[in-house]
Amino acid sequence: MSSANENSNPLHPLLGEELSAVVFVRDYVQLQFDGPGLTLINDPTVITNATKYQPALPGYRDALCERIGKSVSNAQVAEGDELRIDFNDGSTILISLRPGDYIGAEAAIFNHGEETWVW
């Protein structure tokens, strides 16, 4: 039986999951968990220890990869604003869903089993 939170939050399956891989593909990034996967067309921002890492800045790729092995403590969608994934070490990955930040038709694609969500 699904709870109201599960039904209203497509990222709910990420709770408690560890990030198992970060894959850099030409013009997008994939975050792989043990099962679910998140393809990010809009560039993610990593926030760790009050430092914000964005593409083309030193340490950006390292900051993303250092999330591998960390568990998701919270994952939310704020439609028209952002996808937010918080980890058990206090770090966060943000993906903008603001219309002006889209670099293609989609910002992100979340796959979990046979279900797919596109923003």
Image (cartoon, rainbow, N blue to C red):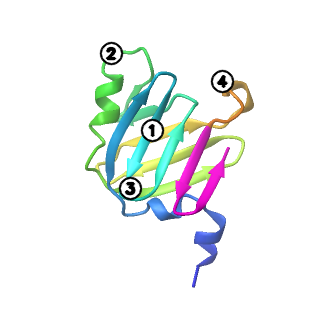
Q: Say which of marks 1 and 2 sits in front.
A: 1
Kind of residue sitting beneath label 4? Ile
Compared to residue 73, the image places residue 21 above or below, namely: above
**Quarter assignment of residue 88:** bottom left
How packed mark 1 is, by other alpha carbons closer than 10 Å (few <14, some 14-19, many 20 or more), is: some
Marks 1 & 2, CB-CB < 8 Å contact: no
Q: Nearer the viewer, residue 51 or 109?
A: 109
Compared to residue 60, the image places residue 33 above or below, namely: below
Disc 2 designates what residue? 58
How packed mark 2 is, by other alpha carbons closer than 10 Å (few <14, some 14-19, many 20 or more), is: few
Disc 1 designates what residue? 30
Q: Secondary structure at mark 4?
A: loop
Kind of residue sitting beneath label 3? Val
Q: Say which of marks 4 and 2 sits in front.
A: 4
Marks 2 & 3, CB-CB < 8 Å contact: no
Residue occupying image coordinates x 35% and y 57%: 34
Which of the image's four quarters has the N terminus?
bottom right
How far apart are the two marked residues, 4 and 3, measured between alpha carbons? Answer: 26 Å
Name which of mark 1 and mark 4 comes first in the sequence: 1
How far apart are the two marked residues, 1 and 2, measured between alpha carbons? Answer: 20 Å
Name which of mark 2 and mark 3 comes first in the sequence: 2
Name the spot of residue 30 as percent of width and height, x first: 45, 38
Q: Secondary structure at mark 1?
A: strand
Kind of residue sitting beneath label 1? Gln
Which residue is situated farthest in the front direction here? Answer: 114
